Amino acid sequence: MIDVQGLRALIAVADTGSVTAAAALLHYTPSNITQRVQRLEHAVGAPLLERVGRGVVLTELAHRLVDEGRAAVRSLDDLAEVVASDGPSGRVRVAAFPTALRGLVVPLIRTLLDADPSLRVEPVELEPADGVRQVRLGLVDLAIVKVWGATSSRTDPDLHRVVLGQDAVDIVVPRDHRLTGRPQLRWADLTHETWAVTPDDDPYRRWLETTTGLDRGSGIVYEAAEFASLLAFVQEGLAIAAVPRLGRGELPPGTVAVPLAEPGAFREIAAVVRATRRESVNVRAVLDAMPLDALSQTVRADSVR
């Protein structure tokens, strides 16, 4: 008999390329992964991993098991929910990037606990690419993702995408800045300003560089990875920053947010689930309870991309 947990471990090794990475993905230890794969090897009567240097490679049989077993593991996950209850209950694993975790998922947990304690949301903080990856692997049920400055046009038959809304971007300036009091701003109003931005490899930074058309080459640019740190530069009067509203919280004292009236001055926020789970009662309950007040142009109807 095929050992399902061993098959999950083998699929994780195939997807990540190593036992160590598979252990991190599944939240096990490397020895746990090895033991699970060994039990699967005993069940099929043949080796599945071969040592090559310090790493491992899958045997031909292992590749076949992964190819054929991936859909079976997902189907078992889906079946477990179907037979468990006619209504929402049990665990829903939700991956979200940091500001969506703070601005959407944490309030969601409170809402669902108050409404129906039988449905439990387990949050996982992950960037969008990692969240989608774990949706594919069946390690999370839903991932909240973002696309800067445009709506996503990518399609994938294995995934179902529900657009939640747009997270508007404001320009945050010191309270005594010359632009304070403006009803709105355009990129042209911000020429030659000193900026606080994220590092070059961040999607936000790439969006900002390609969208604004501003010449910041002659001025100081302060860099930090977190939006809270960007706001600290603004609070000290050192820079301005373009910051999305979701999960931002109260602005630091001495700062003002001015709306940015530019096309694409937002990030699209969406939820991604496997196509086979789109009608899941638990997934639907989570989407219906999602607190979307922080988003503009919110959409609760499904939008398949």
Image: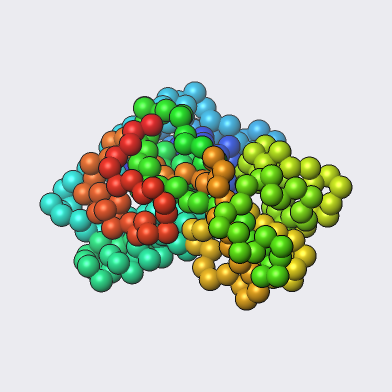
Q: Residue furthest left?
A: 86
Dividing the picture into quadrants, the one containing residue 73 is top left
Q: Residue furthest right?
A: 218
Residue 305 vs residue 69, the one in the foreground: 305
In this image, 103 relative to 184: left or right? left
Q: Position of residue 276 (x, y in %)?
A: 28, 36
Q: Where 196 sits versus 70, above or below?
A: below
Q: Is residue 81 visible?
A: no
- Tell me which residue sits at (33%, 69%) in the image: 110
Q: Quadrant of the N terminus?
A: top left
Q: Position of residue 176 (x, y in %)?
A: 70, 70
Q: Where 104 sits versus 75, above or below?
A: below
In this image, 270 relative to 216: left or right? left
In this image, 204 relative to 127: left or right? right
Residue 200 vs residue 151, the one in the foreground: 151
- Tell me which residue sits at (36%, 49%) in the image: 298
Q: Is residue 77 visible?
A: yes
Q: Where 92 sits versus 77, above or below?
A: below
Q: Quadrant of the C terminus?
A: top left
Q: Position of residue 200 (x, y in %)?
A: 73, 45
- Tell me which residue sits at (56%, 58%) in the image: 183
The colouring scheme, among rainbow, by chain, secondary structure or one colour, is rainbow
- Tell me which residue sits at (29%, 40%) in the image: 302
Q: Position of residue 30 (x, y in %)?
A: 55, 51
* Total marks in image: 0
